[in-house]
Image: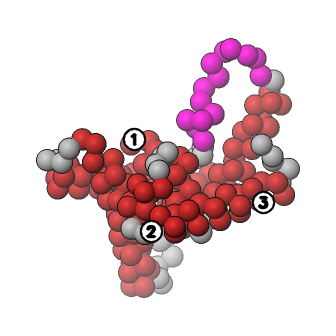
Amino acid sequence: MEKRAFKRSYYHVRNEEAALDIVQESMMKLSEHYGDKPANELPMLFQRILSNCTLDWFRRQKRHNALFSHLSDFEAPGDDAGDFDLLEAWAGPDDGERAQSAEDLARRSQTLRDIEIEIQALPPRQREAFLMRYWEEMDVAETAAAMGCSEGSVKTHCFRAVQALSKALKAKGIEP
């Protein structure tokens, strides 16, 4: 769960250190405030806490930027996004079942980078709904509870995200 939470946070803040801090803060809050809850409720609570911690991070950044925007050494989100692999778990290590050429591996790597770029380009709420539904494999009700919105809003955000991703990836020649 920690790795998926990190990737979800990283998609939002586009800063590896900040994403790690957000996940750590979320886990601490979960253990401090909800340790007595039944185990089956913890994943939902964690998703909601993670969303709230991410929003808090953006609020702190906005406040920081308003106060210190004249400083040139402020690190903007996304500065170290170059080495992040979006679908590392999906791509996984080569299991040796079939040999792949260097060209196949390069093409697959480029496709994964293209998908990552398009997911990052989604509006924040669409990206959040998409990642919860299809990356975290949460159902509509769980996603709605975690995002603090209605089930209809989750469906709308997911539909729009899938449409936008499909259109963008088809424009790049990537089709299922």
Amino acid type at circle 2 is Ser
Q: Position of residue 7 (x, y in %)?
A: 49, 49
Left-right relation of 164 to 10? right
| Disc number for residue 150 | 2
Does residue 95 belong to the magenta stretch?
Answer: yes
Q: Nearer the viewer, residue 115 or 113?
A: 115
Q: Nearer the viewer, residue 135 or 9?
A: 135
Left-right relation of 169 to 71? right
Characterize the magenta stretch by its predominant secondary structure.
loop
Secondary structure under tag 1 reads: loop
Q: Viewer-nearest of labels 3 and 2?
A: 2
Magenta residue span: 87-100
Left-right relation of 41 to 15? left
First-in-chain label (1 vs 2): 1
Name the residue beneath numbered marker 1.
Answer: 1
Residue at 48% from the left image edge and 56% from the top image edge: 140
**Residue 54, quarter of the rendered image:** bottom left
Residue at 38% from the left image edge and 81% from the top image edge: 63
